[in-house]
Amino acid sequence: MTVRVALVTGSTSGIGLGIAERLAANGFDIMLNGLGDAAQIEATRADLEVRSGRRVLFDGADLSKTEAVAELVARTETELGGLDVLVNNVGIQFVSPIEEFPPERWNLILSINLTAAFLACRAALPGMRSRGFGRIINVASAHALVASPFKSAYVAAKHGIAGLTKTVALEAATANITCNAICPGYVLTPLVEKQIPDTAKARGITEEEVIRDVLLAAQPTKRFVTVEEVAALAHFLAGEDAGSITGAIIPIDGGWTAH
Ligand code: NAD
């Protein structure tokens, strides 16, 4: 089979790592990216390389920095011989009432959760056009479709990702390049684990009440979406069979946005 190359931003943990594992297991060479403990990341990279038998590289680019995003795309193309599947997954969260929301946190969330995806699309599209194939998968959120209180920057950035997704899809439609957004409900990853105490504080309730009455309250299945479920959807969108799916904002949220 043809070896495809995938870059997954923010893939040292959580959903991004799950998508990278799924793609590597199905024949993709992978560029991992993210922050964290260097030794732990190297162990993850080496383990994935051995288990998949694919080439797996890591680049620790900080995607809040404008120039770092294009450099990461360029390094992927140079060292792995191209870039067929771009997964814009990197994202952070901060929970606070808007009156107390620090403007610098707003700017950081917008730069990581929205601008980095724009910059990566901008850098990756010329190579995808010249190779005649491309799949861009933006990991958005149910918060690209609906809001929750105390998450102003995150919700604004994720709604922005939906607009970016549709625009890129239209611009690239005749070039065999698709661009779609995956919108998970709550998945139990470090990002969610970290916001439980903050949400408890912001709402004046216990952490158990946050899980039951806030996180899973709107998710009709009453369970967290799994990383594996999100990775399987990303894998499908990365393939040839998904060639007519583009500009789609796809919920995978246990029915949350069906309300
Ligand atoms: P996570 O915290 O487990 O992983 C985030 C990844 O991004 C990590 O690899 C981290 O190192 C990396 N990262 C953070 N800041 C970075 C930076 N400046 N530069 C480069 N890498 C950086 O989070 P997750 O839950 O796996 O979330 C992944 C994506 O899924 C995010 O876009 C998030 O908004 C989205 N999402 C998550 C959930 C959920 O419930 N967990 C739901 C919907 C959408």
Image (cartoon, rainbow, N blue to C red):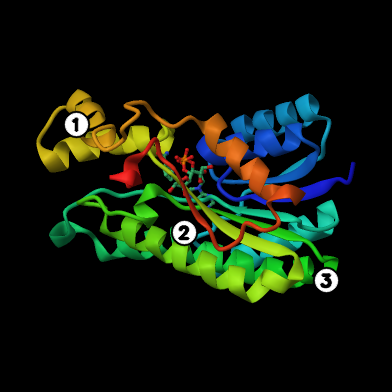
Q: Nearer the viewer, residue 89 or 147?
A: 147
- Looking at the picture, tell me which residue is in the foreground, 49 or 60: 49
Rendered image: mark on residue 7? none
Tell me the distance, in whole angstroms, between the alpha carbons under discs 3 and 2.
27 Å
Is 149 on the left-hand or right-hand side of 133?
left
Mark 2 close to ligand 1, CB under 8 Å = yes
Amino acid type at circle 3 is Ser
User: What quarter of the picture does the C terminus occupy?
Assistant: top left
The residue at 24%/50% (across/down) is: 148
Residue 130 — which label?
3
- Residue identified by numbered label 2: 112
Mark 1 surroundings within 10 Å by alpha-carbon count, few (fewer than 14), some (14 through 19), many (20 or more): few
User: Which residue is drawn at the image coordinates 81% and 58% (left, top)?
Assistant: 82
Q: Seen in the image, is 17 located left or right of residue 27?
A: left
Task: For residue 67, say whether it is visible.
Answer: no
Rendered view: 98 above or below 25: below
For the residues marked 1 and 3, what is the alpha-carbon distance in whole angstroms?
Answer: 49 Å
Q: Residues within 10 Å of mark 3 (few under 14, many from 20)?
A: few
